[in-house]
Each structure stands twice: as structure tokens, then as C-alpha cells.
Amino acid sequence: MNATTSPVNQYFKALQLDEQSNSLSQEILQNCGVEIERCLECGKCSGGCSNTHIFDYTPRKIVQLIKVGNEDRLLQMDALWCCVACQLCVDRCPSGIDIPRIIDYLRERAIDRGIVPTRPNVKLFHELMLDQVQKIGRVSELYLILNYNLKSKQYLNNAELGPQMFFKGKLNPIPARVKRMDKVKRLFRPKPGQKGVAE
Ligand code: SF4
Ligand code: SF4
């Protein structure tokens, strides 16, 4: 019998996988407060996901990849940039696994490692939105969409919605600023030893 396929070696391979998964799972536990081992693999998250039709890996598969510690695939998958944080998977999960929180964490990790996003405009949108929150404590739809269209070079993207939203009072040209900006700024402080949004 080939040494690598003997039952003893297969047993040890399983142990190695488990050790690998522990390191990524532990990191997710520490940084996201999510206990990945509680996943029952029932698939309810995938069944309820609003965007699963465009995911290359379903939410259940993403949790499985974390369990086996396949970080390379997780950081390069297209699904990383397709999640819209709608929370439907969290609502459906019997174990309360917060997949959008994990996806956020993995996005930060992919950016820190210099991995080019499969959907750069999603990253751009996040950056512009966070930039506004950091400056005025809230998001101005008008400036966000103008800035986004300009920077993504999609100058007339959703332009037909502008007048409708304006006349319904949804676009305020003078956005209000949050009074306690010191509290908002605290949200952007990097954790010790972690890169964060610049002050
Ligand atoms: S719904 Fe929850 S428990 Fe079921 S597969 Fe998804 S993450 Fe796992
Ligand atoms: S939060 Fe993301 S993964 Fe969960 S249901 Fe919504 S799009 Fe799908």
C-alpha cells in the first residue's frame, strides 16, 4: 500500500487540516467574535442569501473554507466583493454565524495583503462612504453618488434617479454634520498593531 494513502496517513492528514482550520477559526473568533465551529452545515445561509446567484462560493461554502483554513481561496474569491451585508444569512442561521462580519474582516485582510479586488468599484464605494463618515459623521447620498460616478468614470450611472430623489426630499445639498465628531473619530482609530483608516 502506498504510504501516503494508508489509513494512518489519512488520519494524520485530517488532523493537519483541523490544526490549520483552528488557526484561521481562532483568528475569526478573536477579531469578529464568531465561533465558526458552531456551524451545522445546514445550508440555510446559502438558501436565504440575496446575492448567492452571483457568488462563486456560497455562504455555506465560505464557512467550510474557513473551517479547512483555505485562506488563499477566501481572499481571492469574487464573493468577497459581492456580499451586500443584507444580514439575511445571519437571520436564518440557527447558530448565529455572522457571515457579513467575517466577509468584512476578510476584505480588510485581502487589502492589507495587496490582493487586487475582483470588483474594484465595490472597494471604491466603501472607501468613499467611509471617507464621508470620517469627515462629517454621516453619509450624504448626493455627494456619495456624485463622487462615485466621477471616480468610477460612470458619469451618467443612475442619473435618471437624481431628480426623483431630489423632489422627494431624499437628496440634501447641504448635509448636516454630526455634533460629537470626537466620538466618530474614535471609530476610525486603528487597533494596536493594525492598519486603519488614516486620521
Ligand atoms: S446557516 Fe449557519 S449553521 Fe447553517 S450552514 Fe450557514 S453558517 Fe452554517
Ligand atoms: S449578508 Fe452577504 S452573504 Fe449574507 S445573505 Fe446578505 S449578501 Fe448573502
Image (cartoon, helix red, strand yellow):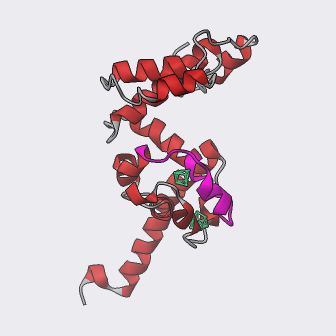
Overall secondary structure of the magenta stretch?
Answer: loop
Residue 84 in view here:
yes
- Quadrant assignment, res 123: top left
Q: Is residue 76 above or below residue 2?
A: above
**Image coordinates for residue 12, horizontal then vertical, percent:** 42, 75
Give yes or no for residue 96 being in the magenta stretch.
yes
Which segment did they paint magenta?
A: 81-100
Closer-to-camera residue (154/124): 154
Residue at image point 30% right, 83% down: 5
Q: Residue furthest bottom?
A: 1
Q: Is residue 65 above or below residue 81?
A: below
Closer-to-camera residue (178/68): 178
Residue at image point 31% right, 36% down: 116
For the N terminus, give its image quadrant: bottom left
- Quadrant assignment, res 191: top right
Position of 111 with respect to 27 (left or right) is: left
**Image coordinates for residue 70, horizontal then vertical, percent:** 40, 57
Position of 176 with respect to 165 (left or right) is: right
Q: Is residue 198 above or below residue 87?
A: above
Closer-to-camera residue (94/4): 94
| Count of numbered circles on the image | 0
Give yes or no for residue 23 being in the magenta stretch.
no
Residue at image point 53% right, 58% down: 49
**Image coordinates for residue 98, horizontal then vertical, percent:** 62, 52
- Quadrant assignment, res 160: top left
For the C terminus, give its image quadrant: top right
